[in-house]
Image: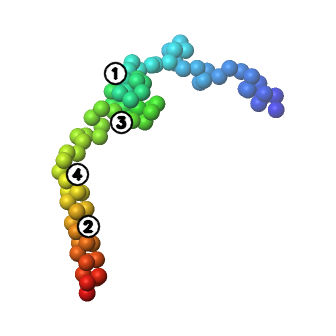
Amino acid sequence: MALLLRDREAPSEAAAPPGGGEGHVAAPDYACATCGAAMVGGQDWCLECGSAAPGRLGQRPGWRPALTVVAITLLLVGGAVVASYAALTG
């Protein structure tokens, strides 16, 4: 029992970081565009707010996907109108 207590009271050398007690701090390469937190190169997401790093999500979609969604919606609405007219008159 005395050995366990003695080990607990002795300072641990493994707890201290190597190099005289000074930890390595990476210099920030750029700041987050949303919150301004420091980000290093190769970091994909901000650790403070969670937003993506610039260029991480690729290019934003253009007009083509939006027009495709609008066209499909109009086609479905038109089909529903025709089907309801046929059901009411037939």
- Tell me whether the residue at label 1 lies in contact with that at label 3, contact meaning CB atoms closer than 8 angstroms: no
Measured as percent of width and height from the top left, residue 50 is found at 43, 36
Taking the spot 74% from the left edge, 22% from the top edge, the residue there is: 9
Identity of the amino acid at label 2? Val
Task: Nearest to the eye among marks 2 and 4: give it.
Answer: 2
In which quadrant will I find the C terminus?
A: bottom left
Q: Which of marks 3 and 4 is nearer the N terminus?
A: 3
In-image side of 32 versus 21 (left or right): left
- What residue is disc 4 on? 66
* CA gap, disc 3 and disc 2: 37 Å
In which quadrant will I find the N terminus?
A: top right
- What residue is disc 2 on? 77
Crowding at mark 1 (Cα within 10 Å: few <14, some 14-19, many 20+): few
Measured as percent of width and height from the top left, residue 47 is found at 45, 32
* CA gap, disc 1 and disc 2: 51 Å
- What residue is disc 3 on? 52
* CA gap, disc 1 and disc 3: 15 Å
Colour setting: rainbow
Identity of the amino acid at label 3? Ala
- Tell me whether the residue at label 1 lies in contact with that at label 2, contact meaning CB atoms closer than 8 angstroms: no
Regarding mark 3 in the picture, which secondary structure is present there? loop
**Viewer-closest of 34 and 78:** 78
* CA gap, disc 2 and disc 4: 17 Å
Q: Which of marks 2 and 4 is nearer the N terminus?
A: 4
Regarding mark 1 in the picture, which secondary structure is present there? loop
- What residue is disc 1 on? 29
Identity of the amino acid at label 1? Asp
**Viewer-closest of 1 and 39:** 39
Taking the spot 68% from the left edge, 20% from the top edge, the residue there is: 11
Task: Nearest to the eye among marks 3 and 4: give it.
Answer: 4
Measured as percent of width and height from the top left, residue 5 is found at 78, 27
